[in-house]
Amino acid sequence: MNYWLIKSEPGAYSWAQLVQDGKTAWTGVRNFAARNHLRAMATGDRVLFYHSGEDKSVVGLARVTRLAYPDPTADEGDWSAVDLVPVKPLAGPVTLAAIKADTILREMKLVKQSRLSVMPVTEAQFKRLLELAGTE
């Protein structure tokens, strides 16, 4: 199993919206590195849901349910989407400030490549984020 982090502005698509919808197609990614990360996702992979913008925190845990397929929202180009379902909210949000202050997490792509919307997370980083969130 692999671990990932996806970012979304809460005003565009929030964790609460994913929970309400029960599933979503993660579309609209228009960055080649992020697209390649979508293509590397496998069914069952765990995905941390990060609210960007003003919130700047990891708030939920989702799961990949469908491998990458052509993004139906793309008018041109070779873009991909995956399907996600919510697993559970984190007991408490893990802020970007807390991530930057943590010795295990400060090396995350979230800190190093802050504009990337889809990124891999190591198993150690994933477990540490859940620990900081008070979530099993």
Image (cartoon, rainbow, N blue to C red):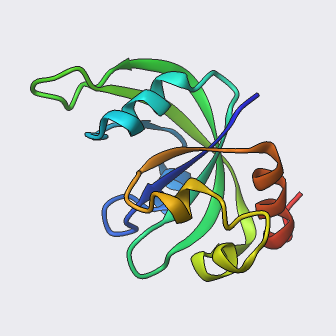
Q: Position of residue 89 (x, y in %)?
A: 69, 61
Is 10 situated above or below 86? below
Q: Position of residue 18 (x, y in %)?
A: 50, 51
Looking at the rendered structure, the number of numbered marks drawn on it comes to 0
Quadrant where the N terminus sits is top right
Pick the residue in front: 129 or 103: 103
Q: Image quarter for residue 17?
A: bottom left
Side (left or right) of 59 relative to 82: right
Q: Position of residue 39 (x, y in %)?
A: 47, 23
Side (left or right) of 32 relative to 47: left
Quadrant where the C terminus sits is bottom right
- Residue at 43 percent across and 28 percent down: it is 36
Pick the residue in front: 102 or 128: 102
Q: Image quarter for residue 73?
A: top left
Q: Image quarter for residue 11?
A: bottom left
- Residue at 33 percent across and 37 percent down: it is 27
Is 33 situated above or below 20? above
Is 115 situated above or below 120? below
- Residue at 18 percent across and 29 percent down: it is 74
Q: Position of residue 41 (x, y in %)?
A: 57, 26
Extreme-left residue of the structure: 75
